Amino acid sequence: MSNPLENIVSSAIVSSFSDKLLDNLQVDAAVVGAGPSGLVAAKTLADKGFKVAVFERKLAPGGGVWGGGMLFNEVVVQKEAKQIVDEFGIRSRELKDAPGYYVIDSVELASGLIFGAVHAGAKIFNSVSVEDVAFANERICGLVVNWTPVERLGMHVDPLVVLTKAVLDGTGHPCEVLNLVQRKARVKLDTPTGEILGERPMQAATGEITTVDNTREYYPGIFASGMSANNVMGGYRMGPIFGGMLRSGKKAAELMEEAIRKL
């Protein structure tokens, strides 16, 4: 008697996901947060042949891109990030009254970044939350993960651990992973005070610069990109302009590659 369709579908999903999860319990780079900087970093590292896993708390990857500005689903990037947009095959249109600035459909940007990262070889695990880090020899060496519904329901379910050579905190404004590191490992971060300085109010031009400048390794094994980096170092927010976020992801990947190759 042949298997009913229901069994074929269920078996395929369970076996395929199990294989994917088992293969990514130890990776070269773990990206927390599938926003624009995280997805660019994931694609860039995967293109170099590194094993990359991305962990996204929400059901839909893409971060804060989808809604554009106040649900007007368009965003802007500047010429410095145009090459990155082109690498992903995402269409853009230069503004007539502001040369050097390009408007992009935010849905196309989000979906294009996701597609590009996955097709480069990065694996995205959605609805997965990072609740802790693994710490050894004065270095971050892994992530402690659980299902987001488990976290939100407050269920007493133990997590699993993903070992990695480098972690990227791309969680946006809260810089959640570095908050965990500072609070639980009780270490000093690479900031003027050794602590998270906190995001400053909107100043788009300055924020676009500091987003890239603040992208760095803040403690051995953990890096920050995008608004996470600005929150750690006290940078300004920018609103729905994403060039700095994309460039931050590129820079993070380059720094992480250098660190991984030294191990």
Image (cartoon, rainbow, N blue to C red):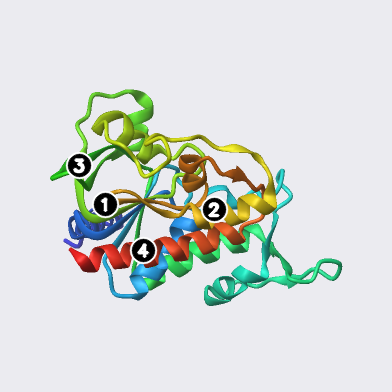
| Mark 2, residue position | 211
| Residue 40 seen by the camera | no
Q: Is residue 127 above or below residue 209?
A: above
x 69%, y 71%: residue: 92
Task: Give the left or right position of residue 98, taking residue 49 as reference.
Answer: right
- Give the mark nearer the N terminus: 4 vs 3: 3
Q: Which mark is residue 221?
A: 1
- Give the mark nearer the N terminus: 3 vs 2: 3
Q: Is residue 29 above or below residue 231?
A: below
x 31%, y 67%: residue: 257
Question: In the rendered image, which quarter contains the C terminus?
Answer: bottom left
Tag 2 secondary structure:
helix
> How far apart, in angstroms, are the residues tagged by discs 3 and 2?
27 Å
Question: In the rendered image, which quarter contains the N terminus?
Answer: bottom left
Task: Give the left or right position of residue 94, taking residue 191 as reference.
Answer: right
Q: Amino acid at mark 3?
A: Ala
Which of labels 3 and 1 is toward the front? Answer: 1
Q: Is residue 166 above or below residue 70?
A: below
Q: Which mark is residue 255?
A: 4
Q: Give the crowd class for mark 2: few <14, some 14-19, many >=20 residues within 10 Å.
A: many
Which of labels 3 and 2 is toward the front? Answer: 2
- Give the mark nearer the N terminus: 1 vs 2: 2
> How far apart, in angstroms, are the residues tagged by discs 1 and 4?
11 Å
Using the image as rendered, state which of residue 253 and residue 117 is in the foreground.
Answer: 253
| Mark 3, residue position | 134
Q: Amino acid at mark 1?
A: Gly
Task: Give the left or right position of residue 261, taking residue 116 as reference.
Answer: left
| Residue 92 seen by the camera | yes
Q: Is residue 91 above or below residue 156?
A: below
Task: Give the left or right position of residue 149, taking residue 10 as reference.
Answer: right
- Give the mark nearer the N terminus: 1 vs 4: 1
x 41%, y 42%: residue: 191
